[in-house]
Image (tube, rainbow, N blue to C red):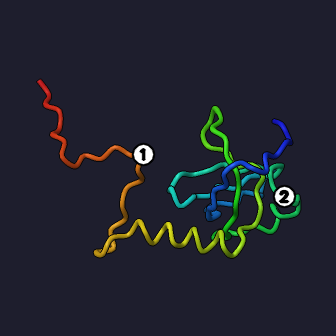
Amino acid sequence: MSRHHDEDAPRVVGSVTTAAREKGHSFVFATGADRLEYFIHRSHCRPSPLFDELLNGDLISFTWLLGPKGYQGHDVRRATPSDAQGYRDALTAQVDSRGNVAPPAHEETMVGRKPARRR
């Protein structure tokens, strides 16, 4: 993969959910406020030592690509305080007054649809 980083690309802020460093694995998974899961390889962290410092729950900022195996994070950096606040605001906006989390906009829901009948 290319090591070129597009400074103008939109960035996603996500929370590290899994950090796999044992047995030669060198990747983390992060979940964005959009609730998508992103795969991040150590080679995409800037600066390079950042990867070894990441813990579950840490907030990171990154660009992404849709690869053959799913969403991949690139140009990974620690989230700035303003990034972190935007992430928290986005999560708060998804919770209604009863504490229910709204589904992501891209997910199809069954509300208003009748189930298909089997014959």
Of residues 105 and 31, the one drawn nearer to the viewer in this rendering: 105
Q: Which residue is mark 1?
A: 106
User: In the picture provided, is 112 more to the left or to the right than 98?
Assistant: left
Q: Residue at x 38, y 69 (%)?
A: 95
Three-letter amino acid code at disc 2? Arg
Of 11 and 115, the residue lying toward us? 11
Residue 25 seen in render: no
Q: Which SS class for mark 2?
A: loop
Image-quadrant location for residue 12: bottom right
Which residue is at 11% across, 23% downward? 119
Above-or-below relation of 78 to 35: below
Image position of 85 (left or right of 60): left
Furthest residue toward top: 119
Q: Position of residue 99 (x, y in %)?
A: 33, 74
Q: Indicate left or right for 101 with 116 as reference.
A: right
Residue 83 on image: x %, y %: 65, 69
Kind of residue at badge 1: His
The image position of residue 13, as x and y in percent, is 63, 61
Q: CA distance from mark 2 to mark 1?
A: 30 Å
Residue where numbered disc 2 is placed: 46
Q: Is residue 74 left or right of residue 117?
A: right
* Extreme residue in the front direction: 8
Q: SS class of the residue under badge 1?
A: loop
Q: Residue at x 75, y 67 (%)?
A: 78
* First-in-chain label (2 vs 1): 2
